[in-house]
């Protein structure tokens, strides 16, 4: 009986020593060499640092002070790292344990509205002029935004009054208050009759305006400046009792635009 009891005690000890299971993690875990534990979500890592988000606040850690990395679903065994703690504790006292750093958000999203005033410089076959336009759209992320634009442009002082209607594609190079941006407008040129011309009617043509520029300000309000090349064409028609004629006009202008995002 006594021997049986000893066998049962030994069997119970072996089962607990060799058959124990660790805790299954529901968040990421970083164990430091001073025995500290940081629970959260690992959002970035490279060959020098780890960044873990804790309650929405990012914490950047030098890999010199990190002992173990555990991910969601891993089993964490108490005592996995304790034997290495003593010999590495001195490394922690040689510098700052960690620092708070911003998490870069590349998903710049939201509605935007930009009003522009433009200077249309003289081209090879037109005298240039000025114009205004407004664009309303949605920025899906930093690199992609789509909008609808309307405006009035005088590209020539005789027949070059057009009403452009276009779709805009735009994006930003940096996620900063001051950032270069690119822009492409494609649509239709609706001609407006000039009282000084002899044409009786007109028909719309194409509209094309690529540009590059700078944004200075936040994602909600900013000053915008860009330079581009505006290409538009329209057809003017003259019908009277003696004859009928039509002429196609092509406008090519270098354009400087100044705008405000609100």
Image (spheres, rainbow, N blue to C red):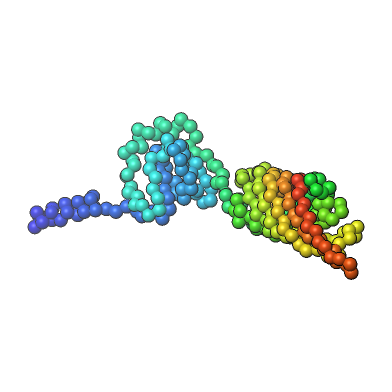
Res. 115 in view = no
Residue 237, given in percent of the width and then of the height, sits at 82, 63
251 or 222, nearer to the observer = 251
Residue 140, given in percent of the width and then of the height, sits at 60, 56
Relative to 48, 160 lies left or right = right
Residue 166, given in percent of the width and then of the height, sits at 71, 59
119 or 231, nearer to the observer = 231
Quadrant (top left/top right/bottom left/bottom right) for the C terminus: bottom right
Relative to 56, 75 lies left or right = left
- Residue placed at 57% from the left, 49% from the top? 105
Relative to 56, 255 lies left or right = right
Res. 202 in view = yes
As drawn, 237 above or below 257 = below
- Residue placed at 42% from the left, 42% from the top? 36
105 or 123, nearer to the observer = 123
> Which residue is situated farthest in the bottom direction here?
241
- Residue placed at 19% from the left, 51% from the top? 14
- Residue placed at 42% from the left, 32% from the top? 91
214 or 194, nearer to the observer = 194
Q: Quadrant of residue 179?
A: top right
Residue 158, given in percent of the width and then of the height, sits at 87, 54
Quadrant (top left/top right/bottom left/bottom right) for the N terminus: bottom left
> Which residue is situated farthest in the front direction here?
242
Q: Disc count in the image?
A: 0
């Amino acid at each position: 009986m006594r021997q049986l009891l000893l066998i049962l005690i030994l069997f119970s000890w072996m089962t607990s020593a060799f058959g124990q299971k660790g805790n299954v993690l529901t968040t990421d875990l970083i164990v430091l060499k001073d025995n500290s534990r940081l629970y959260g979500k690992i959002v970035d890592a490279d060959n020098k640092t780890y960044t873990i988000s804790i309650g929405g606040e990012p914490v950047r850690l030098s890999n010199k002070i990190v002992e173990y990395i555990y991910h969601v679903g891993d089993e964490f065994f108490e005592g996995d790292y304790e034997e290495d703690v003593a010999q590495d504790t001195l490394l922690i006292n040689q510098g700052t344990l960690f620092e708070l750093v911003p998490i870069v958000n590349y998903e710049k999203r939201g509605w935007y509205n930009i009003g522009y005033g433009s200077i249309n410089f003289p081209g090879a076959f037109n005298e240039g002029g000025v114009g205004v336009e407004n664009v309303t759209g949605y920025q899906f992320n930093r690199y992609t935004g789509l909008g609808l634009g309307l405006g009035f442009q005088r590209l020539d002082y005789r027949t070059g009054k057009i009403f452009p209607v276009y779709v805009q594609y735009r994006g930003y190079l940096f996620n900063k208050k001051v950032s270069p941006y690119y822009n492409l407008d494609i649509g239709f040129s609706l001609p407006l009759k000039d009282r000084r011309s002899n044409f009786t009617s007109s028909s719309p043509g194409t509209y094309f305006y690529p540009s590059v520029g700078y944004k200075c300000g936040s994602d909600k309000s900013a000053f915008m400046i860009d330079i581009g090349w505006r290409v538009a064409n329209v057809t003017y028609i003259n019908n009277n009792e003696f004859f009928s004629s039509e002429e196609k006009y092509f406008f090519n202008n270098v354009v400087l635009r100044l705008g405000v995002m609100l």
